[in-house]
Amino acid sequence: MRKFECAAILFDMDGVLVDSTAAVARAWRKWALAHSLDPEPVIAGAHGRRTPETIAEFAPWLDAEEEARRIENAEAMDLEGVEVIPGAAELLRSLPEGLWGVVTSATRPMATARLRDTGLVVPRVLVSADDVANGKPHPEPYLKGAAGLGITAGRCLVFEDSPAGIRAARAAGMRVIALRTTFPPEALQDAEAMIWDFADIRVERNGNETLEIEVRE
């Protein structure tokens, strides 16, 4: 059992609060094949990053913003197999409002729709792809999340599932617990702990206004 103490928690969304891996893969596979690209590297490269940035890497000759709209529309309409990560709903309900937020590479409409469609709370602080100039692995998204909560970045704990997201959080000066939902453990080594889902943690609020997280790895 490992213990972490923080003032607030920031969650990535896909692969952390919501298991949407299959829907994401289906959308990217269809797009890659339509453009004669090998879908496997595209799918792997898309996790944890903003859609236009992935398109610019794999198909720089295309209009990234226009292609992104098509892919995100396809993802938003595909709810097959999209489920809440075990323990996520209970954890969010247990956290005091204002002490947690979501930092996602999805657009704001997609993020709010996916959270609502799965019955999760849409937090007051939601940093989406639309809210930053630089996506993960740049630290801007997580720094903006901490600022939105009014808490120093170094006092935030992050739950992430992708190497890009882990790098972003660490660059922001935050500690990270990785979920083994999307990538193999060797890709998540920069995190300070790894879990399968939120059944592996327990969160308590201390009297000194901090959160204590116990992790069973």
Image: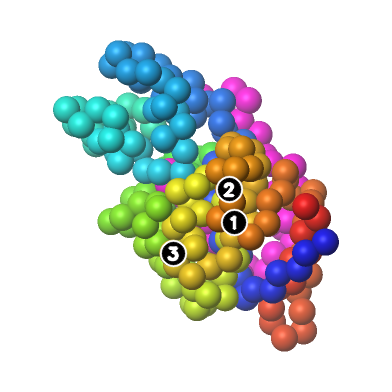
Q: Is residue 36 above or below residue 41?
A: above
Q: Which range of residues does the magenta coloring cover? A: 78-107
Sequence-first disc among 2 and 3: 3
Quarter of the figure with the N terminus: bottom right
Mark 2–mark 3 CB contact (< 8 Å): no
Q: Amino acid at mark 3?
A: Ala
Magenta stretch holds residue 79: yes
Query: Which residue is more in the foreground, 185 or 208?
Result: 185
- From the image, tell me which residue sits under label 3: 171
Q: Where in the figure is residue 142, as x and y percent of width and height?
A: 45, 62
**Quadrant of res 84:** top right
Tell me if mark 1 has few (under 14), some (14-19) or many (20+) residues whose alpha carbon lies within 10 angstroms of its own: many
- From the image, tell me which residue sits under label 1: 191
Kindly tell me whether residue 11 is visible in this rendering: no
Query: Which residue is more in the foreground, 155 or 180?
Result: 180
Kindly tell me whether residue 135 is visible in this rendering: yes
Task: Identify which residue is drawn at 41% across, 27% down.
Answer: 41
Mark 1–mark 2 CB contact (< 8 Å): yes
Which labelled disc corresponds to residue 188? 2
Element marked by disc 3: helix
Specify the farthest residue to the bottom: 208
Q: Is residue 114 above or below residue 145?
A: above
Magenta stretch holds residue 20: no
Q: Is residue 190 above or below residue 34?
A: below
Element marked by disc 1: loop
